[in-house]
Structures are given as C-alpha cells and as structure tokens.
Image (cartoon, rainbow, N blue to C red):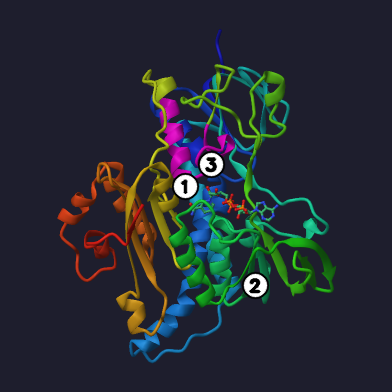
Amino acid sequence: MSFDYDLFVIGGGSGGVRAARVAAAEGAKVALAEEDRYGGTCVIRGCVPKKLMVFASEYSAMVGDAQAYGWDITGGAFDWDAFKGKLHAELDRLEGIYRNLLKNSGVTSYDSRATLVDAHTVALADGSQKTAKHILIATGGWPSVPDFPGADLAITSNEMFHLDTLPETILIVGGGYIASEFAGIMNGLGVKTTQFYRGTQILRGFDEEARAVVAEGMVENGVDLQLETNVVSMVKDGDKICVTDTKGREHLFDKVMYATGRHPNADNLGLESLGVARGKKGEILVDQYSQTGVPSIFAIGDVTDRANLTPVAIREGMAFVETVFKGNPTSPDHDLIPTAIFTQPEMGTVGLSEEEAAAQEPVEIYSASFKPMQQSFAGRAQKVLMKLIVSKANRRVLGCHIVAPGAGEMIQLAGIAVKMGATKEDFDRTVAVHPTMSEELVTLKQPSRTT
Ligand code: NDP
C-alpha cells in the first residue's frame, strides 16, 4: 500500500518538530500539522517567555545590590509595554526559526488542526485527508482550571504573556512549578503578589529541605505565601476580583492566575474510535517505544504525561525516530532527569529527595546552607542550599539538590556525575573551584544526619 507520507506528525512543539526533522534527515517523507504557533508550549507560552520574564523580574533586586557595591544608580519603573513588545518580537523570531527548520529539512507543514480518521489517515481542518505509514501525536498539554463558582474569571499561564497592563495585585493559585515561578516573576516586577497553596508546603514531591529554603526565600522577597489555603469562589467587583478563601476571608485582586496543573491535549483527536487507549488524566498510553496499542500510531511529549519537560519530549522524539526509521529499537531514558525550577530563589535537582531515598535504603545526608558571598556583601539575607543524598551501602550519590542563584546551570553539570553513578568519594576527589557557591558540593565533610 502506498501512502502520501512515511510520517505524519500532529503538533509542532519541541518533540514533534524534532521528530519530524530527524526522520526527514533519514530520508523519510514527512509532514507536520500545527493548529497554533510553531514551537509549542515551550517556545510560545512556556519555558522561553517565562525565563525571559524571570530575567526581567530579577533586575529589581540587582539595582539594590549594585548600590550596595558602590554604584551611584537609582532604579526606575518597569515598562511592561516595552518589555512585552520585545518579548513577542523574540517569540516571533523563534517561531520563524522553527518554521525554517522544518522547511529546510524538507518537511511539509500544514497550518491546520489534524485529527485521526483511521490508523493511517489524518484529516485536516479544510476536510482534505493525508495518509501516512506512521502517525506521531505530539500535541502537548494545556492548563487545567478546576470547576468552582467564578472559575471563568481566572487566567492561566497562557495569558500571562499577553497582559494589557501589569496588575497592581495578583493572586496565584497552586504550589507547583508554574505557580511558584510566576509568583517570583510578578513579585520581582513590582506586582503585589499573593500565592495560595492548598497543602502544607509548595513544590510537593521535591526534597523537603530544599522546598522549605525556596519558600522561605520567596517570602523574604515579598511574596505573600498563604499555605493550606484555597479559593472557594470568585466574583467580579468593579475592576477587581473578590476572592473568598477556605478560611472564610475575602480578598480583592486585579488578576487571579491559576496554575493547578496541566492536562494532556488529546481530546477530539479521534483516538477513541481507533481504540487508542488513554489513562486517568486523559494521557495517551504508550509502551517503552512510545507506541500506542495501534501499531502505526505513536505519541511523545506531554500528551503522554511521562516527564513533562521539553528536553524529555525531544529525547522521546529522537528515540521514536531511532526505533521506527533507523531500525534500532530505543526507549527514552526517564531515569535521573536533572531539572530546574526557576523560582526566586532558583532550585536545581536531580535524583531522589531525602524522603524518597530514606524510604528506599539507609542514607547519609550532606548539606550546607549559607549566605552566598555576592548577595551577603550587598546585605541580602537569603540563604542557599547545597545538598547530597548518599547511599550508605554503595556510597553513590542518589540525589543532589541546590537552591541558589544559577542552580539550574549547576545541576546540569552535577547531573552528569550523578547519572554516571558518582560516589561521594568521587565528589570529594574533585578539587574545589574557589570561591564559588558550588564548591560546597565537593567539600561536605560530615553528614548532617543519617537514616
Ligand atoms: P503541577 O502539577 O506541578 O502543580 C499543580 C499545583 O496545583 C499543585 O501544587 C497542586 O496541589 C495544585 N492543585 C491541583 N489541583 C488543585 C485544585 N483543584 N485547587 C487548588 N490547587 C490545586 O503543575 P504546574 O501547572 O505547575 O506545571 C505543569 C507541568 O509543567 C509540571 O509538572 C512540569 O513538568 C512542567 N513545567 C516545568 C517547568 C520547569 O521545568 N522549570 C516549568 C513549568 C512547568 P497538590 O500539590 O496538593 O497536588
């Protein structure tokens, strides 16, 4: 049977674009359909604009630091319009790069929604149909807002990059990556920021000591973090939103942003009629080769809800091409993924938390918490944390957790050692780079506790 394409990719985000390009480079005839903007969540409404906003928001504290270092400067107001214009020009540029990457790789792209018709056919929005030997679904995820009275008044991270004006006050609901990162951004940009989290500490699932250092730093920076608090209802009150919380209090905010998780973007794709199974959150269920129960249909990235991170989606896409187009069955490796949370203070982490490791085996905990030189000279009180979790049995470093300026950059490198199976003694054999914050990772002499 002959097909229009060897591969049809649905979704032009990080995973889909990479898989399409690499398959085309192998000589496959490839098409890709994207209904929105090329680059997906990461480039258009996630990692990239978020990080640029983190950078923008960090300058407010730097002015004070510069003064403390002797600079005769005064901070001015933040110009949201000027920043927003530059931000969107940059996103347009990046989207152009994504489009060109596809074009230059010989991939045919369709600016259209695509849905599945059968195991080898997709339908585009104009009603035309395309056939392909293999179909790859890479449609990503979308923010979820729970159902409650006034939920329609909430915005999500998607809208945060398009605000007409910066609000004077904002409530951010949630305690995960997105809520905690945006709390820092808004606070740094001068918005009076309140964060509600329903549990006892933000960033559930991460190392407890590290979460506490992040939360403490956020509060010191000025975020009004209200733990064990959730929204009951919201009503419009003039230009503002009146929020009633679970403690029976009422508050007025200019904006309310919900970051209460994301769900896989797999509805109305035609999956059910084909027998492609979905899990509890609606994720597409795949095997270790990203293959669904329908042999010609594969799925990668956030729509499969494995590890919802851009570099993971890219690796899943590469492993898919290796398996299907290079005849080399390859599973993406989801073990020991280093990751950064761009909160202020920033956190980088790889491997097991102290709690996970201690539940698994006897461990030694090495940690140092101190005021870093640069900020401490400027009179800032904020602490950093360098922490290693070490197996008592084989001395391997099971987890590394860093809360510090630049923690994301540091954990990328520490992640190599942890992934290689480095022991505490391997860390100790490495000469310290002085004076740095991360030198503590190789000079931690005594365990602070053992389990
Ligand atoms: P998360 O799943 O990380 O966090 C969701 C938060 O919302 C949790 O604190 C959760 O509470 C809370 N929550 C869930 N339902 C409700 C509810 N009904 N009412 C109140 N609170 C609720 O989701 P995010 O949206 O923050 O991020 C989604 C994914 O995006 C992450 O898992 C991550 O993989 C990815 N991401 C990665 C980034 C990075 O690498 N730096 C940055 C941003 C996103 P509880 O803890 O009690 O369940």
Q: Residue at 64% of width from left, 56% of height from top? A: 259
Tell me which amino acid carries mark 1: Ile
**Foreground pick, 190 / 381:** 381
**Foreground pick, 151 / 115:** 151
Tell me which amino acid carries mark 2: Leu
Q: Quadrant of residue 380?
A: bottom left
> Which of disc 2 and disc 1 is earlier in sequence?
1
Q: Residues within 10 Å of mark 1 (few under 14, many from 20)?
A: some
Specify start and end residues of the magenta stretch as a single range: 300-321
Task: Name the residue carrying label 1.
Answer: 97
Q: Is residue 370 magenta?
A: no
> Which of disc 1 and disc 3 is earlier in sequence?
3
Tell me the element at label 3: loop
Q: Is residue 236 placed above or below 358 in the rendered structure? A: below
Q: Is mark 1 within 8 Å of ligand 1?
A: no
Residue that sits furthest to the front in the current view: 451
Q: Residues within 10 Å of mark 3 (few under 14, many from 20)?
A: many
Tell me which amino acid carries mark 3: Gly
Q: Where residue 166 is drawn, which disc sits there?
A: 2
**Foreground pick, 140 / 5:** 140
Q: Quadrant of residue 178?
A: bottom right
Asked whether, in this view, residue 44 is left or right of residue 28, the answer is right
